[in-house]
Image: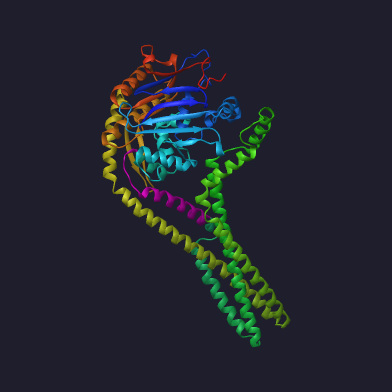
Amino acid sequence: MFLKNLKIEDGVTIIRDISFHKGLNLIIDETGTKISGNNIGKTTVLKLVDFCLGSNGKDIYQDHEFKERGNNTKIENFLKDNNVIISLSLVDDLQYPDKEIIIRRNFLGYRKKIQEINGETIKVKKEFGKKLKELIFNSKNEKPTFFEIKAKNIRYKKNRIKNTINVLHNNTTKEAYEALYFFWLGININELERKQVLQKQKQMEEKLQERLKSEHDLPQIEQSIIVIERIIKKLEQKKNNFNINEDFKNDLSKLNSIKANINSKTTEIGRLEIRFELIKESENELKKNRANINLNEIKSIYKNASRFIKDIHVTYEQTVSFHNNMLNEKINFITKELPKIKQQRKDNNQELNTLLSEEKQLSEKLNKAGALEDLQDLIVELNENYERKGGFEEQKRLWQKTNKKFSEINKELKEINKIINSKDDLIKNRVSKFNVYFEKFSHKLYKERLILSHVKDDRAYSLKINSMSPGTGKKKGEIAAFDFAHIKFCESIGIKCLNFILHDQIENIYHKQINTITEIANKDINCQYIVSVLRDKLPTKLDVEQYKILSLSQEDKLFRVE
């Protein structure tokens, strides 16, 4: 799938209409090294493509690396006040297109939000990615997501510029990368989605076991129960030697039963509290990974903005509401058990209160019976041991339950890994085919033969690149060689891919390698290599005008906003 056109318009005026072509596409910064080219918009073009393909677009007017700088309010206000619409057109073939995908998005929210694919409005971000994956790759599988797939092809963020294959966020699991790497290699394994779900469940059980282990491990609990049962047996025999009436015995037996039930209910409530806390911890971790927003700062911004802008599009409360709605959607899976837990806690507390009331009545009745002091001491000791036994039995039940769950998860994971391991020969074959092009392009660029290899541990397959610790410029060359090789590899085995590569900051690559990259992009593979670069960092012999798709300067910035 190729990029055909990117259009920026405000409903009245077409601000930019950028057409892409095959091969090298240059977004030129004309400012030169003596004048700062910051904020003219050369990298923003890459961000706009990313925005149309599903990013939230905030990095277009926010500096995530230096948050203390705040937002570029001039650009943010321009985009929102003028209802700027970004349109992106993709085609399956630039020369003879049979299929075209047109995406339109703006920067507003709620009813004013525009988020369309081929004229169809898709409000939910997750569904937006699903639709693009289905249209581009003809795949309805959940994993990897479209946003994970496109990360390799749009390299302007720090981790994607520095890392060749680890292009996702730092908290990405091995299982998520495994699904992505297999997708790159054109290997379809349906069980990979289930594997990621199981791994999350396994982590939850591991946290629960850590909590339980902090009190007692299972062998300690089992031995404690044996010892307590022996103590109880002796105390019961001793109690039976007392000459007391039948009613007293019945009431005492009933009291002991109630105390045991109280202990059991208390422990069950504690277990529910642990489960509730674990889910809430996971929810909070997910929120930290997915959202980082200072609501007080937003409120302050809105207060200041309202002084100067009478007709502000959304209120502070609406923004907060939107933020919370997005969070609720993201954590829906992890928190779906909470209502059931809350109801169980409520029911158990009600039952506990009933038992406590019955215990009080029976205790008062027995006290009035005037039992012998020794018998009372014996009963106290006996009840304490019954309570301790009940507590240990509940802990044992929790251990057995989590061990069973853990065993079931590991069994299913083992079966899934067996299916994955059966693809080992196919994986080797695909990696070998990939290396035909990776070795060729890396050698052409730097006279160094880089190769890709696969590694398997007890959790997942992963990929690695064998290299000689390249420097900054060389690393960018490695990335270019890898991205070129992937497109050529996909073409060779007949699988769909994104034929465009968007790179930022190639200034550190030597002129010789830039010329080689140009040759590869134009002659060796069917792709688009789109880069934003300072003009004076390009080789003097390169025909810039032939490859230029956009020229920007301090006098002519991307959005044409001074």
Q: 541 left or right of 305?
A: left
Q: Is residue 192 magenta?
A: yes
Camera-side residue of 103 and 29: 103
Residue at point 53%, 45% (across, down): 286
Residue 245 falls in image quadrant: bottom right
Colouring scheme applied when the structure was drawn: rainbow
Above or below: residue 444 compared with residue 35:
below
Above or below: residue 550 compared with residue 393:
above
Q: Is residue 208 magenta?
A: yes
Q: Position of residue 311 (x, y in %)?
A: 64, 31
Above or below: residue 120 compared with residue 16:
below
Q: Position of residue 508 (x, y in %)?
A: 43, 20
Camera-side residue of 365 and 557: 557
**Is residue 470 something that shows in the picture?**
no
Residue at point 57%, 30% (across, down): 80
Residue at point 41%, 25% (across, down): 471
Q: 284 left or right of 104?
A: right
Camera-side residue of 311 and 520: 311
Q: Position of residue 344 (x, y in %)?
A: 57, 63
Span shown in magenta: 184-210
